[in-house]
Image (cartoon, rainbow, N blue to C red):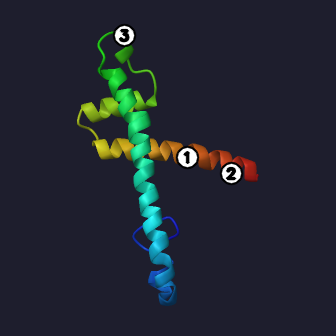
Amino acid sequence: LAQSFDYNYGDFIPILRPFLRGYLRKCKDLQTRRLAFFNNNYVEKRRKVMDTPGDKNKLRCAIDHILQAEKNGEITSENVIYIVENINVAAIETTLWSIEW
């Protein structure tokens, strides 16, 4: 529930609705900016490297395989962004959980 943008606590506790609308709007804005950051700084830069002819376009890292799957029509460009985001979130959460333990 806390991570979903489809629902918020205001749906279940009506008195909180006026306070949570602004927060939900900020969360959606942050998600949009974060996805744009991943697209501009990771995906697009790697696409440029893979599009150059020669030895540089060999598959070298995970994102190369993801972009190759996109070129083959197996996934969409939106899927690529969300996969990159999931990889980043997984790395952050793993580190955080290690620190907590």
Q: Earlier in the sequence, mark 2 or mark 1?
A: 1
Which quarter of the figure has residue 44?
A: top left
Residue 1, percent from left and from top? 50, 71
Helix, strand or loop at disc 2? helix
Residue at the top extreme, as displayed: 54
For image coordinates 45% across by 70% down, the residue present is 24
Q: Are marks 2 and 1 in contact (CB under 8 Å)?
A: no
Amino acid found under the numbered disc labelled 3: Asp
Q: Is residue 8 visible?
A: no
Front position in the image: 56 or 28 = 28
Please state the horizontal and vertical placement of residue 21, each as a whole percent of the image: 44, 76
Q: Which mark is residue 90?
A: 1
State which tag comes first along the sequence, 1 or 3.
3
Label 2 and label 1: CA atoms lie apart by 10 Å
> Where does label 2 land, which residue?
97
Q: Residues within 10 Å of mark 3 (few under 14, many from 20)?
A: few
- Identity of the amino acid at label 2? Trp
